Amino acid sequence: MKQQFYLSAACVLGAERVLAQELGFLGFSSGERTPGRVYFSADATGIIRALINLRTADRLFLQLGNFPAGDFDALFDGALALPWEQLIGRNDRLVVEKARCLRSQIDSQSTVQAMVQKAAYDRLCGVYKLARMPETGPERAVRVRIEADTAWVEVDLSGEALSRRGYRKVATEAPLKESVAAALLFMAGWKRSYPLYDIFCGAGTIPIEAALYAFDIAPGLNRSFSWETMPVADPAAVQVERAAAHERIRTDRDVLIGGSDADASVVKAALANAGHAGLTGRVKLFTAKAEDATPPAERGFLFADPPYGKRLGTPAEAEALYGRLSGLVERFAGWQLCFIVDREDFGAGFGRVASRKVKLVDGAEIRWFHRFPA
C-alpha cells in the first residue's frame, strides 16, 4: 500500500465549504474543517493531483506530526523525532517562516522558530552524514503551531501560493485573488452551461477563472510546486498527472463568458491576462460602464466586484455607485446577481434578500458575497 500523508488545504476564511466540495470532486474524502483549513489524506500521486487541480485553495501543507511541547526540551525532542528527511533534501534550506503559541507555557515565537530549525537540522545532518546543512538547494517553508502545550508542525508543499496561476502578468489596482474568484464561482452555483458576465472585470480574474473551469483547464498546469523536488515525491506520478490534466482540456465547448470595465486600460490588461491563460478569443472583454451593462442572453449569472469602498475610492463614492447599480435588478431579470462588496447589508439598497450570503476574510480584508436569485 502506498504511503498516505495527512494534509491540509488552506483557503480564505469562509471558503472552507466549497474547498471541501472541490476536494470531493477530485476524489478525496475531506475530514476536519477549521477556519481557513480543510484536512484530508492522500498518497504521493494524490498530492500532485491536488496541487495541479485545486482552484479554491491558497496553499497545501503536509502535516509532519504533532507532539507534547510543555517546555523547550520537549519541543526540541519532539521536533528531532519528526521524519524531516522525507521532505527536506541534503542541500535544502529549511525556514520556519511562522510560529504561533496559543494558551501554552511556551510563548516565544522566535525561540520556537530557532529551536525547531535546529532540531530539524540536527536530524538531517545525522541522516545525510553532514557536519552542517549546505543550504544551497530549494527553500522549504515550515510552520509551527503550539496550542495547549501541543505542537503541530507542517511543511508547505506549494512553493508560490496556489493562487499564482501564472497568467496575471499585467497588474491592476485592488485585484481579486484567483483562488477567491474561483470560490465565488462555486458559491454562486455557476455552471458552464450558463452565460457569465462580470461588469467590473478589472484584471479579468473572474471571467478567466470561469473559462479555465468551463474548459477543464487545471489552474496549476503551467507552474511548478515545491513538492516536486522533495525526496519523497514521485517524479513519474508528476508526469502522469500533468499529462492527465492536459487530456481533460476541452476548449471546443460552447460557452459565453464576458466582462467589461469603464477603464479601457484595465480592459487592455484583462485581455493580456486572458491571452497568457491561453484564452484569447474565448473570453469577451470590452469597455463599458457598469451601470450601462445589458444582458447578453435571457438568463445567466452577473458578477460585480465594485472597486470602491475600503479598497479604492471613498465610502461615499461606493454608496453612490451602489445606488446607480440598482437599475441592474430590472434590466437583468432572469439572471442570478452576484455581488462582492464590503457591506453585510448590501441587499437593502436593492430591496432584495440574498439567497446566499457569505463572509470572506482574507488577512485584514473582510468582504461579503451576496447572491440574489433571478
Image (cartoon, grey):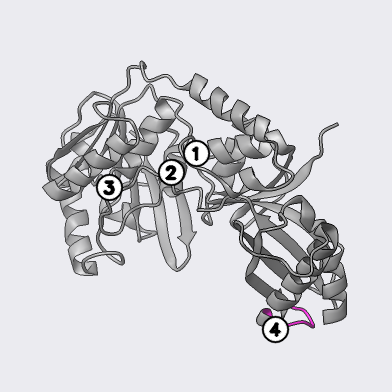
| Residue 334 pos. (x, y %) | 28, 29
Evaluate if marks 1 and 2 touch, with contact meaning CB atoms under 8 Å apart: yes
| Residue 288 pos. (x, y %) | 12, 42
Amino acid type at image mark 1: Gly
How far apart marks 3 and 2 lie (CA) works out to 13 Å
Evaluate if marks 2 and 4 touch, with contact meaning CB atoms under 8 Å apart: no
The answer to whether 120 appears left or right of 364 in the picture is right
- Name above or below for residue 249 compared with residue 211: above
Pointer 2 residue: 165
How far apart marks 1 and 4 lie (CA) works out to 37 Å
- Which image quadrant for residue 261? top left
Pointer 3 residue: 203
Pointer 1 residue: 220
First to last magenta residue range: 103-109
Which residue occupies the foreground of this view, 61 or 134?
134
Amino acid type at image mark 4: Ser
| Residue 50 pos. (x, y %) | 61, 38
How far apart marks 1 and 3 lie (CA) works out to 19 Å
| Residue 83 pos. (x, y %) | 82, 56
- Looking at the rendered structure, the secondary structure element under dot 4 is loop
- Looking at the rendered structure, the secondary structure element under dot 3 is loop
Is residue 191 visible to us here? no
Q: Is residue 144 magenta?
A: no
Amino acid type at image mark 2: Arg
- Which image quadrant for residue 52? top right
The first of marks 1 and 4 along the sequence is: 4
- Looking at the rendered structure, the secondary structure element under dot 1 is loop
Residue in the picture at 71% in, 68% down: 145
